[in-house]
Image (cartoon, rainbow, N blue to C red):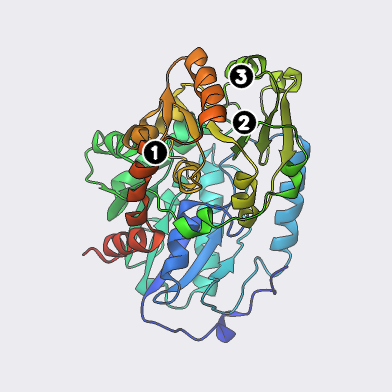
Amino acid sequence: MNRPERPAHKSRVVRTNRQLIVFSDDWGRHPSSCQHLVRQLLTDWDVTWVNTIGTRLPRFDRMTMSRGWQKLKEWSHSGGQGQPGQDSQPRILNPAMWPGFSSAWQRRMNRWLLSRHLRRHIPSLSESIVLTTIPVVADLVGTVNAKRWIYYCVDDFSCWPGLDSRPLRMMEEELISKVDAIVAAGENLAARIREMGRQVTVISHGIDVENWSGATRPHPRLSDLPRPRILFWGLIDRRLDTKLLNALGDGMKAGTIVLLGPEQAPDPALDSISRVRRLGPVPFSELPSAAHAADVLIMPYADLPVTRAMQPLKLKEYLATGKPVVARRLPAVHEWEDCLDATDLTEDFVAAVVDRVNTGTPHKQKQARNRLAAESWREKAKLLQQALLGA
C-alpha cells in the first residue's frame, strides 16, 4: 500500500518547472496507454496522477463491492494516497468523490470535491498542464485555474459496455468544446472529434519490442494445458464474440482456448464452451511468458460500435511476440493487416487459427512487423509532450 498523502506544506520537492496533472484510470491497476506515455515523461515532468471514479453504472455485484471497499480505504488516508517523486512513480491523489454524474447535483458535488482537493494538494495549480482521458472532469475546465487543458481520447465512452454512457457522452461533448488541445489514439476516434468541429492530433499506441520478444520460458499457468494453446489476454466482457469462440472450439480437434484477464459482466455463454479456460488476470510483466506458452494469439471481438471505435493495446503487443496473430477485421487492425490474419467471417477466423497452428507466422508477416521498431513508447511520448506544450 502507498504511504498516506503528505500535507500540502510538506509536499515533495519539485524537480522541474513542468507540472503535469493527469486524470485517468487508477495508476498501476491496469496497464493503459496513458500510463505507458506518462512513465516516459517522469524524468522531465513533475507529475501528479489523480485517480477518479464515476464512469461505470452502479452494480451490486462482487466486483463493484470490492472496488468500493478499495476506494473507501484509499479515501481514509486524508482523502487520498501519495508518494514522493520517483523516476518510475508519479505522485498519486485519491480524492473522495460521489460515484456518479447522472444528475446536476452529482456533477456539482464532484466539481466541488475535485477542485477543493486539487487546490489543497497542488500549490502550483495555476502553472500546471492538465491531461485527461476521462470526460468526468468537464466541469473543472474554467473552474480550476490551470495553465492548459488537453483531452486524450482513447475510447468512445458512448458505446462502451457497462459505462454510464448518457452523462459521459454529454460531458465529453462539453470537454471537447472547452479544452485547449485534443489527442486521439486512432484515426477512427479522431474522425468523430473532427465532426464536432475540433482539430485533433493522432498519437497511436506504442510498444516496447524488447519486452515482448525476450521471453524464454512459458508461463506456468499455461504450460500444463493441452496444446495447441490459443490465447487471448485483456478485459473479458461483452465485446468478445462468444459464437466465434464456440465455433473455434468446435473446429479444433485438440487443445485449449485460454482467456487471461479480469472479467466485467461477460456473456454467460462462455461457460458452455468446452475448450475455453478462463484463468483470471496475471501481472502485466508476466504476459510475455504467457505468449511464449501459446501457439496462436487471437483477438476474437464481435463487430460492434464499441469495437470499431477501440484501439486495443494488445494488437502491437501480440505482433511483437513473433507469434501468429488472428484478429477480427476492425478499424484498429487495418494498418497492420500485412502483419497478421484479419478476417470478417467466423469460418475464416477458425480456418486461419487452425492453419497458423500448423504453419506458424509466415515470413512475409515477420518482415512486415519490423516496422514496430519505430513505434516505441518513448517516441510516442515525444509527440504527446509537443501536444502538452502546444508546440
The residue that mark 1 highlights is 363
The residue that mark 2 highlights is 237
Q: Nearer the viewer, mark 1 or mark 3?
A: 1
In depth, the one of 79 and 308 nearer the eye is 308
State the separation of the CA atoms marked 1 and 3: 25 Å
The residue that mark 3 highlights is 248
Q: Which residue is depicted at the point 58% across and 26% down?
A: 240
Question: Could you tell which of marks 1 and 3 lies nearer the N-terminus?
Answer: 3
Question: Could you tell which of marks 3 and 2 lies nearer the N-terminus?
Answer: 2
Q: Where is residue 317 in the image (x, y as percent from the top left)?
A: 49, 47
The relative height of residue 86 versus residue 308 in the rendered view (above or below) is below
Residue type marked 1: His
Q: Where is residue 270 in the image (x, y as percent from the top left)?
A: 70, 22
State the separation of the CA atoms marked 3 and 2: 18 Å
Whether residue 46 is visible: yes
- Image quarter (top left, top right, bottom left or bottom right) of the N terminus: bottom right
Q: Where is residue 287 in the image (x, y as percent from the top left)?
A: 61, 50
Q: Which residue is depicted at the point 41% across and 25% down?
A: 329
The relative height of residue 116 versus residue 360 in the rendered view (above or below) is below
